[in-house]
Image (cartoon, rainbow, N blue to C red):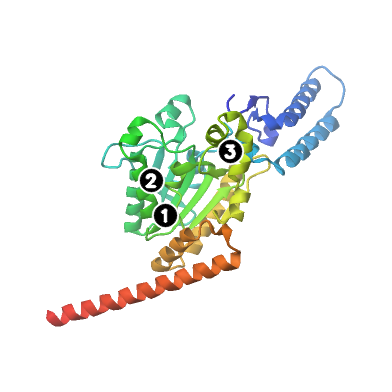
Amino acid sequence: MSNGATATAADPEKGAAGAFLEFEKPLARIENDIQELVREQQGSSCRELTDDIKQQRSRFKSTMKRLYSSLTPWETVMVARHPKRPLSTDYLRMIFRDFCELHGDRVFGDDHALMTGFARIGGHKVMFVGHNKGKEVKERIACNFGCAHPEGYRKALRKMKLAEKYGLPVVCLIDTQGAYPGIGSEERGISYAIATNLMEMSRLRTPVVCVVIGEGGSGGALGIAVGDRVAMLQHAFYSVISPEGCAAILWRTADQRKHAAEALRLTAKELCKLDIIDEIIPEPMGGAHRDPQKAAENLEKYIVGSLNDLKRFKLDTLVRRRQGRIRNLGGFFDSRTETKAKAEKEAQKTRRTTSRTNRLRERLTGRQKVIS
């Protein structure tokens, strides 16, 4: 199995996904011991093994807690890429209702790597935008494994503009290795499409909530990740390049991917320290793939709470705060006090500019009335 996962019998009572990653070998051994004890008890053996099974299951939980409390960056990448990890389509099914998919960019075609459409979550009507990696082989090929073309980003932006028109908040779920790097993608202007999304999303006059649910790779992720609230699931990662790509550039070999993952500081904990993201959404013990329903509940709680909070702001204030947040990215070179002072100064400058613009507009409107 890919991504360092090895197939092993899973204990249904624990909701295990039927595959163990490379660093989970101790869990695989304990799981095999449990299965052996269960088979022995169900067989012709007269031994009572219930206590032994309980003891092994308790050992399984404690070992899992120990492993997942101290994941290395590369192990986090492995968990984010787990073949059974919930995808955008899974969360769409579990926490969104009345989804009505919208297709096409009215320029080239419909990109299946990005899904868009109207939906409901909690008590909110929203515009859903999310990467689609696909589940089966044919679906994954059709979706380019979640790597979108320029038409995908144009489609996403058109639907965000539609949401702005009708006053609907936008919810973006990010899970991609990056934008599709093929010749056709370059010919149709992938860089320009992503850059346009960054600019337009920064001034979109409606609340925008973005969550990295798995892989957050390069500009492919950033193309739908400019929002008022940006969060990550606990075991997701978000980076300018994949660890393998970084290792190939710096060390001329992908074998150094573990060192690259550490250098990139791509985990949710590191990015929260750098103020790149606003919040870390907790996952069930052992990752979202072990209990997708619990992971979905945590995600829904965050999205609904963020939308309730953002809807209290006026649209002008919302856009001003979002743009201020973007300007202060990279503020880790300064102290938090200096960063906040700069943000307040920028906000005051923006308010003065807005006030002058409004006064000028009122004067022009008054003159037009007098002339008419």
- The answer to whether residue 279 is left or right of residue 148 is right
Q: Nearer the viewer, mark 2 or mark 1?
A: 2
Pick the front one: 126 or 215: 215
Please, what secondary structure does the residue beneath circle 2 have? helix
Q: Amino acid at mark 3?
A: Ala
- Outermost residue on the left side: it is 372
Look at the image and tell me in which quarter the C terminus lies.
bottom left
| Residue at which label 3 appears | 80
| Residue at which label 2 appears | 194
Q: How packed is label 1: few (under 14 Cα within 10 Å), some, or many (20 or more)?
A: some
Placement of 346 over or under 77, stated as above or below: below
Distance between mark 2 and mark 1 Cα atoms = 26 Å
Which tag, 2 or 3, sits closer to the chain's start?
3
Look at the image and tell me in which quarter the N terminus lies.
top right
Is label 2 in contact with label 1 (beta carbons under 8 Å)? no
Q: Amino acid at mark 2?
A: Ile
| Residue at which label 1 appears | 125
Locate residue 22: give its quadrant: top right
Q: How packed is label 3: few (under 14 Cα within 10 Å), some, or many (20 or more)?
A: many
- The answer to whether residue 142 is left or right of residue 329 is left
Is label 2 in contact with label 3 (beta carbons under 8 Å)? no
